[in-house]
Amino acid sequence: MRIVLTGGGTGGHIYPAAAVGKQLQEENPETELLYIGTSKGLESRIVPALGIPFEAIEITGFRRKLSFDNVKTVARFIRGVARSKELLRKFKPDAVVGTGGYVCGPVVYAAAKLGIPTLIHEQNAIPGLTNKFLARYVDSVAVSFKESEPYFAKAKHTFYAGNPCATHVLRAEASRGLASLGLPRDSRMVLMVGGSRGAKAFNDVLVDMAPHLQRLAGVHFVFVTGEHYYESTMDRLRSVQPALSNHIHILPYLNNMPEVLAASQLVISRSGASSLAEMTALGLPSLLIPSPNVTNNHQEANARSLVEAGASEMLLERELSGQALLDRMTAIIGDAKRLKAMSEAAAKLGVPDSASRITARLKQLSSSR
């Protein structure tokens, strides 16, 4: 098969597309991929590093308020469609997969107009603007949350697939995660991470909590600050606790996140769709602090889906403080029955075969041309 992948702006759009591509190549090593993104987006760095051929188009997103910039965006969209058609005619794909972000708009639209089978994947409980626009043109819409299906009532075909990032995290070895942190194999661990770039609010409460974490004896705490915040967070930590306890581990970034996730007993994180997919695939209890700075407040909707299922608890950022987080974390990690129930609920939500569900549909679409 020859498949075009597109989606960008954040890792939450890029990694699901890459996971679908990886699954296709595992099923058939002769599969050829092309990723179309923007030169300014994260995809321009992430995708080539994954070994996937990359081409760029120029496109920007629409502003939600009336603005002359939107006139320019329409012009860029038209040029982006023309450039996309040029790339598609040259590559001759069997299908095109879009995973959201404004870049996939002109690419998927162009494919639909050329009669190429198209599929979009929506990661969040509340769909993004681009995917809602594309739904009327594509052959299939795959959703990560069942709650998303009503938003695509006018689509030709919608199906529940989960998030393909879940598929490959299952291969992660907990023992390797612990070893990478220098921890014994039987360690109990809480992981706190504010996303790949970190979150200031998380680092602020870390500084507040650090002197009081000794109350949770026998638990190792791994905090990922984000590279931008690492030095300033470490300076602040040293000012309140000159000698950090040996059960507190502060890191700027984790290159082996799936392995460390697999070794965790509790995860404190934002509620981006890819992260939730990985946690539910592994059956991990979580304490979620949704980012309030996202479109349509979709992270809170994502989190509520897990909370209602009993897999997670949620603490809104406006309620967040060192004491509030410490109290909630202590109550969860100290209750074995509670942890077990949350773990079982998370596992029920997991869709470990998500990537193969999507590739199966792609094969159906391409064979029907």
Image (cartoon, helix red, strand yellow):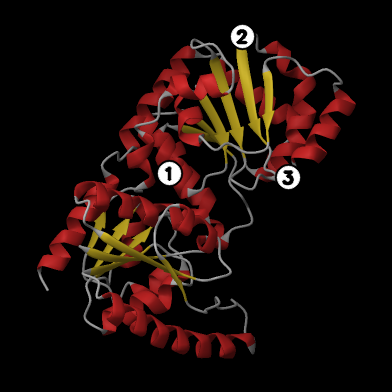
Provide residue 165's location: percent of width, then percent of height. 38, 45
Q: Residues within 10 Å of mark 1 (few under 14, many from 20)?
A: some
Provide residue 314's location: percent of width, then percent of height. 56, 37
**Is residue 330 or residue 253 the one in the foreground?**
253
Mark before the other along the chain sequence, 2 or 1:
2
* Residue drawn at x 62%, y 79% as measured from the top left: 65
- Which quadrant holds the N terminus? bottom left
- Residue at which label 1 appears: 305
Mark before the other along the chain sequence, 2 or 3:
3
Q: In this view, does 352 lie to the left or right of 184?
A: left
- Residue at which label 2 appears: 218
Task: Answer yes or no: is residue 332 visible.
Answer: no
Seen in the picture, residue 144 relative to 109 is either above or below; the reply is: above
- Which quadrant holds the C terminus? bottom left
Q: How crowded is mark 3: few (under 14 residues within 10 Å), some or many (20 or more)?
A: some
Q: Indicate the secondary structure of the residue bearing disc 1.
A: helix
Q: Which residue lies furthest to the left in this view?
A: 368
**Is residue 140 or residue 363 the one in the foreground?**
363
Mark before the other along the chain sequence, 1 or 3:
3
Circle on res. 321: none
CA gap, disc 2 and disc 3: 27 Å
- Residue at which label 3 appears: 200
CA gap, disc 1 and disc 3: 25 Å
* Residue drawn at x 38%, y 80% as measured from the top left: 84
Query: Please, what is the three-letter code of the amino acid marked with disc 1?
Result: Ser
